[in-house]
């Protein structure tokens, strides 16, 4: 039970999309937003769920919260079928939608929390403790009496995260929690989530576009593309999937046509600076020597491939299939 | 999808239905509780600015009262409207206004469902442990709508004072009965109209034509309208039961379409049928939303 705290078994979600093709004609196409996805998340784990736009991330989250009913397959969260017992599940989960607030737009933050207190029937002492903790760690003290619509994006996001946690949920879903936040707000949110996971043992599933979120928070990452799970494992393992590449950046004396050396290809030219990609498994030294020998080299650097590029390549490889 | 999985999905769907049916009473209780909670918060929040609240109530009172001013203007040129005198029309106006005002106060926010579906904020309501219907109905609970009720009741008061009616206990009972039943019938229209917006997100104006349009219709005697329209609001959308039929009984006036006299006593029954129908439409809409996500 504890090892399949969140469990998906062959879960599918099919939408009928109607498209206008004429004045009255409509073409119906079936879209498989989520296609036979299976995974499980043990209690207390913090997992990143990533993929390009429209890959099915949000659809998965919606099925895990009971907003959407799966077309096929089995979903269990804390032993509850979300689609069937949505309101019962609501007490066990916290949800943060990055793009829209769950707070009451026209009311001060404090009023939203007061309403959550009663709506979730949170015991008074728990509410007090949780409020104090969130106010302190998320720096909400001065914002409590400000109407939500007057908060900045970062402030609102912190307010939303607090709102999702007041009822001590066992699972926290975060859909793009750092989208549009500045660097400082992002760091605050990440620190808070890390503490929450280690101190409270809250299970966290987060979707994001910002891979730094994943690098800093999650040991495990799942990659979804075109509705299918294409990777599920350690973050480090992503580098080994497919052929990972490193980049040699060379500054030449002047603008020259793309450098030609064996074992590397030019991927970008910008004035006298050129970017050469070469397999990560190969040493950079012979390549540097070869370039230096034949070209007027001024400066150089070697860049490890970032996770973002690995994933972008993964998507590209898949769609080429 | 394999046959076994299909069967499993079906079983899950059935269990969901049964679960909902069994919990209907519990759902209503939870809904009322949530409604009161949310409405109370909005009242507290409006009361923080008493002066602006007072102005809003007055504005609502005045804006809705203009309708009656229009009727008064008409009667300054004619003695009767469709064969009805001013106090009689005032009686129709007052009962319709009070009934509609009551349902507008409680359910008036329902027409925002379509925009919530469009901008995706409906999802945030679906992850809370209380019924969605209550959350939408109570959202931005506007006590200023008391203005419309007050205005309707004042006109009704005027009618009751001026009208020369031979009151019987039954006729006395009819007045509160039609206001309450009427409010419930209108509330059902609000809910059913909102349910329709799950499929047609821009349909709030269609809904408004039935609610706000409906109450305007009921403020005038049925004799001024075409028979087909009267048939429509009697047998299709049962607005005639809000005030026309019971009010004509109280006024001792002939019914439209030669309807039998006992129809005047049916409003509570009609309201009792409308409620579960609207509830079923709402559940259908919500289920459709949860399977399509749009």
Image (cartoon, rainbow, N blue to C red):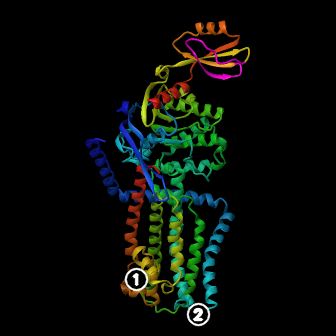
- The residue under the point 36% across, 86% down is B260
On screen, residue B53 above or below B258 = above
**Quarter of the figure that contains the C terminus of chain A:** top left
Q: Mark on residue B172?
A: none
On screen, residue B113 above or below A168 = below
| Mark 1 Cα-neighbour bin, 10 Å: few <14, some 14–19, many ≥20 | many
Asked whether A266 falls inside the magenta stretch, the response is yes
**Percent x, y of residue A224:** 45, 33
**The image quarter in which residue B159 lies:** bottom right
| Label 2 sits on residue | B79
**Percent x, y of residue A314:** 49, 27
- The residue under the point 44% across, 45% down is A90
Chain under numbered label 1 = B
**Percent x, y of residue A122:** 48, 46
For marks 2 and 1, give the CA distance: 27 Å
Asked whether A320 falls inside the magenta stretch, the response is no
Magenta: main secondary structure = loop
On screen, residue B244 above or below B17 = below
**The image quarter in which residue A131 lies:** top right
Of B201 and A27, the residue lying toward us: A27
Q: Which of the two labelled residues, at mark 2 and mark 1, occupies the earlier sequence position? A: 2
**Quarter of the figure that contains the N terminus of chain A:** top left
Region in magenta: A255-272
**The image quarter in which residue A287 lies:** top right
Visible in this render: residue B266? yes
Which residue reaches farthest front?
Answer: A257
2 and 1 marks in contact (CB < 8 Å): no
Chain under numbered label 2 = B
Q: Mark on residue B264?
A: 1
- The residue under the point 55% across, 42% down is A128
Of A9 and A125, the residue lying toward us: A9
Label 2 SS: loop
């Amino acid at each position: 039970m504890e090892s399949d705290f969140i469990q998906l078994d062959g879960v599918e979600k099919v939408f009928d999309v109607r498209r206008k093709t004429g004045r009255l004609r409509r073409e119906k196409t079936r879209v498989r937003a989520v296609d036979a996805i299976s995974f499980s998340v043990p209690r207390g784990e913090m997992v990143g769920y990533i993929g390009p736009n429209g890959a099915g991330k949000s659809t998965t989250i919606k099925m895990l919260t009971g907003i959407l009913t799966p077309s096929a397959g089995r979903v269990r969260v804390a032993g509850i079928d979300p689609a069937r017992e949505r309101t019962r599940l609501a007490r066990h989960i916290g949800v943060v939608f990055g793009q829209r607030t769950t707070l009451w737009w026209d009311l001060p933050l404090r009023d939203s929390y007061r309403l959550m207190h009663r709506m979730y029937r949170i015991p008074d002492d728990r509410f007090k403790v949780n409020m104090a903790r969130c106010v302190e760690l998320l720096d909400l003290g001065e914002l409590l009496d400000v109407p939500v619509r007057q908060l900045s994006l970062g402030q609102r996001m912190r307010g939303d995260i607090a709102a999702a946690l007041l009822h001590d949920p066992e699972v926290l879903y975060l859909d793009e929690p750092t989208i549009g936040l500045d660097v400082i707000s992002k760091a605050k949110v990440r620190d808070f989530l890390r503490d929450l996971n280690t101190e409270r043992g809250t299970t966290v599933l987060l979707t994001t576009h910002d891979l730094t979120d994943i690098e800093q928070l999650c040991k495990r990452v799942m990659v979804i593309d075109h509705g299918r799970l294409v990777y599920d494992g350690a973050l480090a393992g992503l580098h080994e999937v497919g052929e990972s590449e490193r980049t040699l950046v060379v500054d030449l004396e002047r603008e020259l046509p793309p450098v030609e050396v064996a074992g590397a290809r030019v991927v970008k030219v910008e004035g006298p600076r050129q970017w050469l990609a070469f397999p990560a498994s190969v040493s950079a030294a012979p390549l540097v020597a070869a370039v230096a020998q034949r070209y007027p080299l001024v400066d150089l650097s070697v860049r490890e491939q970032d996770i973002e590029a690995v994933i972008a390549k993964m998507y590209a490889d898949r769609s080429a299939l | 999808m394999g046959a076994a999985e299909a069967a499993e999905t079906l079983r899950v769907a059935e269990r969901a239905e049964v679960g909902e049916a069994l919990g209907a009473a519990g759902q209503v209780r939870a809904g009322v509780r949530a409604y009161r909670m949310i409405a109370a918060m909005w009242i507290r929040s409006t009361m923080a600015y008493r002066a602006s609240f007072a102005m809003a109530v007055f504005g609502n009172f005045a804006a809705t009262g203009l309708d009656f001013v229009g009727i008064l203007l008409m009667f300054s040129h004619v003695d009767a409207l469709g064969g009805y005198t001013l106090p009689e029309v005032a009686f129709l106006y007052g009962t319709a206004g009070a009934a509609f005002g009551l349902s507008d106060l409680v359910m008036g926010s329902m027409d925002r469902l379509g925009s919530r579906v469009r901008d995706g904020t409906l999802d945030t309501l679906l992850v809370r442990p209380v019924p969605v219907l209550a959350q939408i109905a109570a959202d931005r609970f506007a006590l200023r709508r008391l203005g419309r009720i007050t205005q309707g009741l004042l006109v009704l008061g005027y009618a009751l004072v001026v009208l020369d009616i031979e009151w019987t206990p039954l006729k006395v009972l009819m007045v509160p009965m039609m206001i309450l039943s009427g409010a419930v019938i209108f509330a059902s229209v609000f809910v059913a109209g909102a349910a329709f917006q799950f499929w047609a997100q821009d349909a709030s104006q269609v809904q408004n034509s039935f609610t706000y349009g409906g109450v305007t219709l009921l403020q005038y005697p049925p004799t001024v309208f075409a028979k087909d329209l009267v048939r429509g609001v009697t047998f299709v959308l049962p607005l005639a039961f809000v005030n026309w039929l019971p009010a004509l009984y109280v006024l001792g006036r002939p019914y439209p379409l030669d309807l039998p006299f006992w129809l005047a006593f049916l409003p509570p029954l009609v309201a009792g049928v409308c409620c579960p129908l609207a509830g079923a439409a709402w559940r259908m809409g919500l289920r459709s939303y949860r399977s399509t996500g749009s």
